[in-house]
Amino acid sequence: MKDVVDIIDENKWAWAMYGFQCDTDFWDPYYDVVNKKGDSKEWKIEYVGKETEGWKMMVDYFKLNKK
């Protein structure tokens, strides 16, 4: 997700909407893969709240935009 946000920021496109109005749980920042050690074909995503790496990364980018 960080790579995607970097590209969007480089082009000065708005990206915040995509983080909050997801069409699938895969892109939702409150969901994460819960069994990353297993085979990627068996990965399951579940709601885990604001402790996901994706959410933390988005918050860091929001902080940069406040400056």
Image: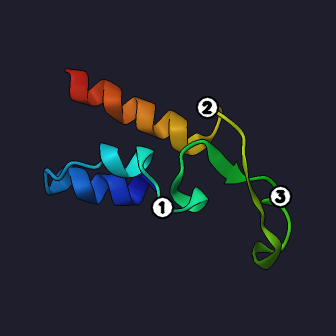
Q: Label 1 sits on what residue type?
A: Asp
Q: SS of the residue at dot 3?
A: loop
Task: Judge depth for marks 3 and 1 and give the one in front.
Answer: 1
Residue bearing the label numbered 1: 23
- Seen in the image, is 37 located left or right of residue 4? right
Neighbor class of circle 1 (other Cα within 10 Å; few <14, some 14-19, many 20+) is: few
Q: Which mark is residue 35?
A: 3
Q: Label 3 sits on what residue type?
A: Asn
Q: Quadrant of residue 61?
A: top left
Is 34 situated above or below 56?
Answer: below
Residue bearing the label numbered 2: 50
Q: Quadrant of residue 63?
A: top left
Is 40 situated above or below 58?
Answer: below
Which corner quadrant holds the C terminus? top left
Are discs 3 and 1 less than 8 Å apart at CB? no
Query: What is the distance, in whole Å, between disc 3 and disc 2 at their CAs?
Result: 18 Å
Q: Position of residue 36 (x, y in %)?
A: 78, 59
Task: Judge depth for marks 1 and 2 and give the one in front.
Answer: 1
Task: Judge depth for marks 3 and 2 and give the one in front.
Answer: 2
Q: Position of residue 19 (x, y in %)?
A: 42, 47
Q: Earlier in the sequence, mark 1 or mark 2?
A: 1
Query: What is the distance, in whole Å, between disc 1 and disc 2 at their CAs?
Result: 19 Å
Q: Please identify the residue farthest to the top as the structure is shown.
A: 67
Q: Position of residue 55 (x, y in %)?
A: 52, 38
Q: Earlier in the sequence, mark 3 or mark 2?
A: 3
